[in-house]
Image: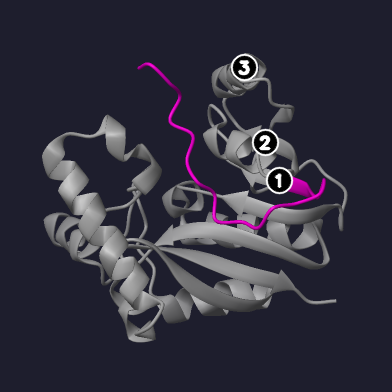
Amino acid sequence: MEAYPIPTIRLPKSNGGLLLDVGCSWGRWSIAAAQKGYRVIGIDPSLGAVMAARRVAHQLGVDVDVVVGDARFLPFLSNLFDDVFSYSVIQHFSRSDAALAVGEVGRVLKPDGISVIQMPTQYGIRCLQHQIKRGFRDGIGFDVRYWSIPDLKRLFSSKIGLTAFSVDCYFGIGLQYSDIKLMPIWLQVIVAMSELVRYLSLIFRPLVWLADSVYVRSVKRP
């Protein structure tokens, strides 16, 4: 590729707020947050991914710290981070491991700190298609687990605090408009359609329930 696909992270600009990127992989979301003014620490269980994140951040001239660690047992002090972000990570956890990870997010956030975590839903078109293919059984291993909006609200509200939802994308999981130039034409059309319905969801809120992927935004209780 001629350039790294750095996405547009849906967080406000920051003046040095400390952000944790859970499951940072090679660092594209960490870099996106750093470019918005956050001081970023990325964590990932893969040493190779963390080393790649360091190389990419250095090549792009961005300051990002990275740590090898487990989202279920975060190696950080309580009440440390202003914000926590995670994309395409906790969706692969078992229900019990997801509860552990979300609880850890709540622990390391400062009071009134904000977490923004992407999760798949049960009722999106592509999510339903995948669930039908595997007979609606729950995932095993690295499979994606599909969540209902009420179940997500119960989990995040109990572990962190006040929780609300916004649409990430439709017709798939992980479709980013910022990546559109790297996609074939047919996929560009799907991403454009997803963006259109996402904007409509800002007006007609029930459309959130039909998204394939949502952002779960939670504010830690003081």
- Left or right: 124 as drawn, with respect to 29: left
Q: For mark 1, what is the residue?
A: 20
Q: Looking at the image, is 188 positioned above or below residue 47?
A: below
Across and down, in percent, residue 159 comes to 68, 71
Seen in the image, is 6 located left or right of residue 144? right
Q: Does the magenta stretch include residue 13?
A: yes
* Percent x, y of residue 137: 25, 61
- Tell me the kind of residue under disc 3: Met
The residue stretch that appears in magenta: 1-19
The residue positioned 55% from the left and 58% from the top of the image is 117
Measure the C-alpha gap from mark 1 to mark 3: 17 Å
In the image: residue 33, left or right of residue 215: right
* Precedes in sequence: disc 1 or disc 3: 1
Q: Is residue 76 left or right of residue 181?
A: right
Residue 90 drawn above or below residue 215? above
Specify which label sits upstream in the sequence, 3 or 2. 2
Find residue 132 and name its label: none
Residue under label 3, please give it. 51
Q: Badge 1, how many Cα within 10 Å: few under 14, some, many 20+?
A: many
**Residue kind at label 2, given as amino acid type:** Gly
> Which residue appears at 47% of the width and 41% of the height?
7
The residues tagged by marks 3 and 2 sit, at their Cα atoms, a distance apart of: 11 Å
Quadrant of the image for the C terminus? bottom right
